[in-house]
Image (cartoon, grey):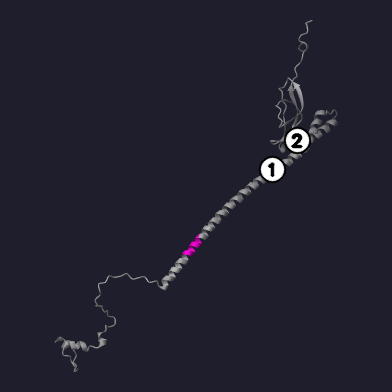
Amino acid sequence: MIYEENQPENTAYQPDNALEAIEEIPAEASSPLEGEKVLDVEPQSAQPATPPQSVATPATEGQQVALEALIMETEALKAQLEASNSQSEALKAQYARIVADFDNFRRRTQREKEEFEEQIKCNTITELLPVVDNFERARSHLNPQTDSAQTIHKSYQSVYKQLVDSLKRLGVSPMRPEGKEFDPNLHEAVMREPTNEYPEGTVIEELVRGYFLGDRVVRHSMVKVAAAAEPVITSEEIHPDSPES
């Protein structure tokens, strides 16, 4: 036999049949060699397979706790961000109000400053106007005859001209009310004269000159105003029934 030919020559005991040969194999020989795979040939029952139940391990529980902590931290950061945004919007609104208030304050202060300067200028000009009046009266009433008097007259008239030019540069202008309708906002009526030459309420003459500072009245003009003429009563109107002579 081939088995017998491949067996080494041995004078030891040879089993008579295959069953005895199997029984003689030592236990170590029946174990699989290192690196070899052993197939499990045991028959399995026909029971349906059940899915394995997930068993929470300590590592899985730690991850769940960490995830919940991360979610809570995210929610806290989100709430903090919303609070910061609300605070930022409130600060922006407050800043806008402060800017508007400061702008209004700056405009009001500038307006008050201009009005204060205008009032000071008006007060100063009002104090100087009587000097101008005196120069004008002197020019209209004085008539120098000699050369020395004429020299003196020209000297103070040059001072008068210099004063008038300074007032013009400041924005002062005189009123010209003659022939215009009386305006109580500009004029002050000190005399009324009945006349038929002018309509009633017309300024006939300016007695004391008035002045403007820009559009503002520095001094009202003192004027004479025309009044309605009184009707002339004749003797016939007094005695209408008297017999004719």
Q: Quadrant of residue 136?
A: top right
Label 1: few (<14), some (14–19) or many (≥20) C-alpha neighbours in 10 Å: few
Location of mark 2 (residue): 164
Q: Quadrant of residue 230?
A: top right
SS under mark 2: helix
Q: Residue at x 43, y 70 (%)?
A: 61
- Residue 177 screen position, x and y as percent: 72, 28
Q: Are marks 1 and 2 in contact (CB under 8 Å)?
A: no
Alpha carbons under labels 1 and 2: distance apart: 24 Å
Q: Residue at x 69, y 44 (%)?
A: 112
Q: Residue at x 54, y 55 (%)?
A: 86
**Quarter that holds the C terminus:** top right
The secondary structure that dominates the magenta segment is helix
- Residue 71 screen position, x and y as percent: 46, 64
Q: Residue at x 79, y 35 (%)?
A: 130
Q: Which mark is residue 114?
A: 1
- Residue 9 screen position, x and y as percent: 18, 92
